[in-house]
Each structure stands twice: as structure tokens, then as C-alpha cells.
Amino acid sequence: SRRRDPFRRSARSVASWKAPGRARAMFRTVAAALARRSARHVVDATERRFSRFDALRRCEASDAFAGMCHDARALGPLPGDAEHAVSDVDKFLFDTNGFVVVKDVFSKDDLRAFHDAIDAHAHLIHERKGQLRLTAAKTPLSGDGKTGRKDLAGFLGWQKPHCDPFRSVLAHPKLVPYLHELVGPGYRLDHNPLLIMQDPGAEGFEFHGGSTLDSGDWNHPLGYDFRHGKMRCNLLAFAVHLTDVEEGDGGFCIVRGSHKSNYVCPPSIKRYEEATEHSYQPAVNAGDVVVFTEATTHGTLPWRGASQRRNLIYRFSPANISYGRGAMDDGSYLAPAPNWPSSYLEGMSEAQRCVMAPPYHPRLNRVAVRNDASGVVKPAPREAHKVDFDRAVFKADYF
């Protein structure tokens, strides 16, 4: 900076003063001291400004955020935020429409790995028939009336290498910046991921989600908000397209801007019977990912494509929020399981595994994925005297 430093200006003035003998020497000594003080002042300020980020880059979190409260330490930006930020264009589009299409996330080799794994587990696919169908007969979303949607899950726990492509979604370098921007550091997998398949003629799915409940109340578990210069989604979804979708083919469909609606969505719109021009079906290529907030009204159109559509759905939530129960429940409310099935976690990278953590605030020693997905950022440990106090009071490390 070319800003003038008052200490240096004073030092130069004293040093140039025409004083005789000892007085002149004394003032030169004072000038040198002032100059040293100025240099220390600048260096100390610079070190204070950047020590937080340097410490995080080294993962020496015990030195980061010195003197700051735990909330500031836990919720502040992570290293690499600036280098791997979501573009201004995508921020504008997401805030305006409630979704954005991230292009070319997965390569042809990646897609081949997804498809090979799915084909190897085709015997686990379930088709929705009878009472499990998602649409009423002879409605705009019912398709040919007989072909049901096909579902497949559990792939995070498949044997290697078949689990690997599905696990890569959890901490992918092209997707983590969107998770940090829209959900926040320490994001977590909320729902068990699902593969949706539609054969030609398959039914769609009535529009759902939305910012407003049928009662007219705010749907806060799915809520979208903008506060203090940041977008935040209580439930963020990825639609990972494994096959091409042309305009008019059907599949994923969304009502643009509905995440900001304050009115109940009329049933005729949910059933795709009215105002269909406001429901947008994006054309996407295999390997693209549609990032959308569950606060939008969205659904699925019947499939008119020539071959099977394959689409993965992942849902993420902020560190301390949970909608689904898969991360901590074995099906009995009396005996919650500590985490996801062990087969899901076995062999995961450190970055992938931290996304599987149950909900709790980042200040409670939560590990977060680095913004470039190259590893993790470890938190500053809680002060020993606070941990000792909690152990004495709660008989545990955490309250």
C-alpha cells in the first residue's frame, strides 16, 4: 500500500531536523525507534489478517481464529473459497430460479463406471406398480398407464469398485463450491441417495416440495433464505444425470422461482394440468448435475425418450440440520443407530466420510471438506477447561 504512515512521517521529520551534536544523535535514535515500531505495527496487522487462513491451509486449526468465539471459527469461510467460488452468473441464476445446471461434472469414463455398477446390480431394482404408482390414472403425468418408475438405492455400500463413482458425488471438486455456497461448510448427506429410472412410457411424479405447506405455513424444513449477503438452503438436492435429456423428453421439471413463493401451490399445477408453461424441463447432457433447492416446486414428467433415463438424487443439509433419519436410525425410535450402515463408510476417503456425519453444529469439532475437495479442514479444538467442565457435568465430551 502507498498509504502514508504517520509513524514513518514523524521519523523522517525528526531525522532531518537540524540539531547540533548530542541532541541530533538523540533524535536520530528516537527516529529509528519510531521506524521500528511502524514496521512492527504493519507486520503484526498483516499477520493477524492472514494467520487464520494460513493456519487452516496447514490444518493447524489450534492456531486459527485466535481470540474469536467458536461460532466465528466454525462458520467462517474455508481456505480456497476465493479460488473455487461459485460464479456470479450461477449465484444470480440460483437465487432467481432456485436451480442451476453445472455442466460436464462427470466424464465419459465416470459415466461408464456408473452404468457398469448399476447393470451389475440390476436384480435389486424395484418398479413402482399398483398402489406404489406415483400418479393417478389418465392424468397428464401418468405416462402410458402401466410402466412404473424404477428405483435403486444402497449403492454407497456396494463392493469396490462399484461404490466408487457414487461416493465421488459426496466431495467432488466441481460440486463442493456449490455446497459451501448454498448449504455452508460442514455440509452433510441428509437422505439415502436414490437412483431413478424411467423406461419409455414410464409415469412421472406429481410436483412436490415448495416453500409453502398446504396449510399456508412456511415449509421451513425445505426453506430457502438470503441473509447478510449469503444464500442458504435447509435442503439442497443434486440431480446427477447419467443419460442425455433432450427438450420435450420429459423427466426432471421445475417451476422457476417457486422457492420464493408465499402462496400454496394449486393442485392443478402440481398435477401438471394448468399453467404448464411455467414448468421448465431443462435439456441436459449425461454428466451434468442440476443443483436445486427443495424449496422449489418440482416433479417429474412422463418419459418420452427412446431409451431408459437414469438420474441420481442426492440431498444435503447444513451441518446441524436433519430431515432424513438414515444417518442415525435403525428403524426403531427407541434404539437409534450411531451412523449409516458400516458398508457405506468402509473404505471411504476422509473427505467423503466427514459428509456422512450426523447433524451437529460445526463449533463442536466438526471436520469439513476443503473447497477443492482435496481433503479436509480440521477444527480448532475446544478449550481444555470447557471439555473438562462438560465431562464433569454431562459425563461426556459434548453437551
Image (cartoon, rainbow, N blue to C red):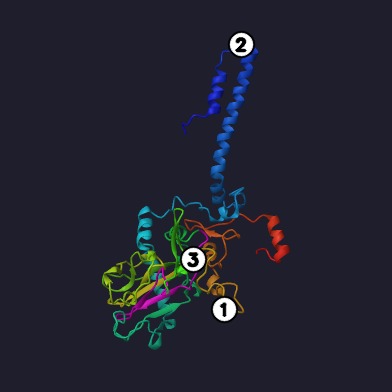
> How many residues crowd around disc 3 within 10 Å: few (fewer than 14), some, or many (20 or more)?
many
Res. 330 mark: 1
Write the start and end of the magenta stretch as one range. Answer: 185-214
* Helix, strand or loop: magenta stretch: loop
The percent position of residue 257, horizontal first and vertical second, equals 35, 64
Q: Nearer the viewer, mark 1 or mark 3?
A: 3
Distance from disc 2 to disc 3, alpha carbons, whole Å, reads 73 Å
Distance from disc 1 to disc 2, alpha carbons, whole Å, reads 88 Å
Identity of the amino acid at label 2? Pro
Identity of the amino acid at label 1? Asp
For residue 362, what is the image quadrant? bottom right
The local secondary structure at tag 3 comes to strand
Which residue corresponds to the image point at 57% horizontal and 62% vertical from the top-left?
A: 361
Callouts 1 and 2 close, C-beta under 8 Å? no
Is residue 106 visible in the rendered image? The answer is: no
**Camera-side residue of 256 and 143:** 256
Identify residue for label 3.
Answer: 317
